[in-house]
Image (cartoon, helix red, strand yellow):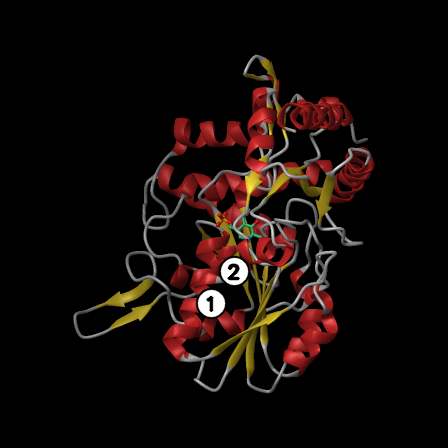
Amino acid sequence: MFNVENIRKDFPILSRKVNGKDLVYLDNAATSQTPKQVIDVIVDYYSNYNANIHRGVHALSQEATDKYEQARHKIQAHFNAKHAHEIIFTSGTTHSINLVANGFTSILKPEDNIIVSALEHHSNIVPWQMLCERTGAQLKVIPMNQAGELIMSQYDNLLTENTKLVFVNHVSNALGTINPIEYIIEKAHQVGAAVLIDGAQSTPHIKPDVQALNVDFYVASAHKLCGPTGQGMLYGKEDWLKKLPPYQGGGEMIAEVTFEKTTYADLPHKFEAGTPNICGGIAFGAAIDYMNSIGFEAIANYEHELLEYATAQLLQIEGLTIYGTAKNKTSVISFNLDGIHPYDVGTILDKLGIAVRTGHHCAQPIMSFYNIPGTVRASFAFYNTKAEVDALVLGIKKAKMMLS
Ligand SMILES: *Cc1c(COP(=O)(O)O)cnc(C)c1O
């Protein structure tokens, strides 16, 4: 049974003080906290079997290789990929997107177009703009409405037979909107376009099934789902990963090297040049295990309860506007107080031990859409409590009094 007080005991950081107050950590969309089950795996790696992988004949190297490849299998099972070699370890969502964007350089022609959404993180905008600069292809944008939802009828109109790729996030980091990716994928496939889904914000709340979605690429970062920073993944359909050229050259990714010609290693190693974040990969697997031990359905239900509780209370505060009111959203609340800069609100909350994010959340086009400099964003995880929501509400009221 879901018991938040027991769950909180898994997270050492949650019992620390900040500015003399109990920490209230509500910046989970930027990075999640790490349970001791994952910290223990990291300590165990460096204490007992730290070694380079894949080439060593010695015991430590074998152990590290086994654990690293086991983690790949855990991730494969979690996302229901058909093959373990369809899971590429990367340093995170940003790296994964750049890998695919680089690969499409040789595929796109100047008459082609690719489609992004208005709701994206800069990580899912800039690499594609760079791709368009290299190839002459056109970047088109699915627009959003006031609620922070994508306008699907306009998406239909953007698709043409020259559309080669569509890339949207599953969940918006700035607003929490859950996008209709099933529809987006199906429509893209009808014109022969591939789809990449940025799962950085969905994977902490939702367990995606890449085969049921029939998605071509799905990317995520470990640090947003209780894993370490500097670690992520790219899922790609085998056919696509075979078709795309390697991203980086170096050790690990080759079959044979001569000065005349080099041949590349098979998947997944073709895309994993150099010594990877071995401990990070293993800890990513442990984080997936931990999240599954709690259960994604229980996580989603509990977080939804927190979201509704927090939304109702925040709307009672006069002069507070919530941005992102999609019907389908995760536990993210972006808001502003009338006439008060978000940074000032964040600073006062910090003095009270409450960690929120302020600013544009790496999504400047969304802020431009609402014509605001940024928002205050409170993002909840399954280890947050209603008492913490109460502390936030009190803190906002205090900030409003001091600043207006
Ligand atoms: C955090 C985030 C990213 C970038 O992830 P990194 O771990 O910084 O590479 C990309 N897209 C979305 C939606 C995000 O929330």
Q: Which mark is residue 300?
A: none
Would you place residue 209 above or below residue 360 in this image? Answer: below
Residue at (54% x, 44% y) in the render: 222
Q: Is residue 170 left or right of residue 115?
A: right
Local crowd at mark 1 within 10 Å, few (<14), some, or many (≥20)?
Answer: many
Mark 2 surroundings: few (<14), some (14-19) or many (≥20) residues within 10 A: many
Is residue 176 depicted above or below 169 in this figure? above
Q: Position of residue 102 (x, y in %)?
A: 40, 68
At x 50%, y 61%, the residue is: 85
Q: CA distance from mark 2 to mark 1?
A: 7 Å
Residue at the spot of label 2: 124
Where is residue 404 drawn, in percent x and y? 65, 29
Q: Let me know if residue 67 appears in the view.
A: no
Nearer the observer, 220 or 171 = 171
Residue 105 position by quadrant: bottom left
Q: Does mark 2's beta carbon lie closer than 8 Å to ligand 1?
A: yes
**Residue on which the image places disc 1:** 128
Look at label 1 and name its amino acid. Answer: Trp
Residue 281 visible in the shown view: yes
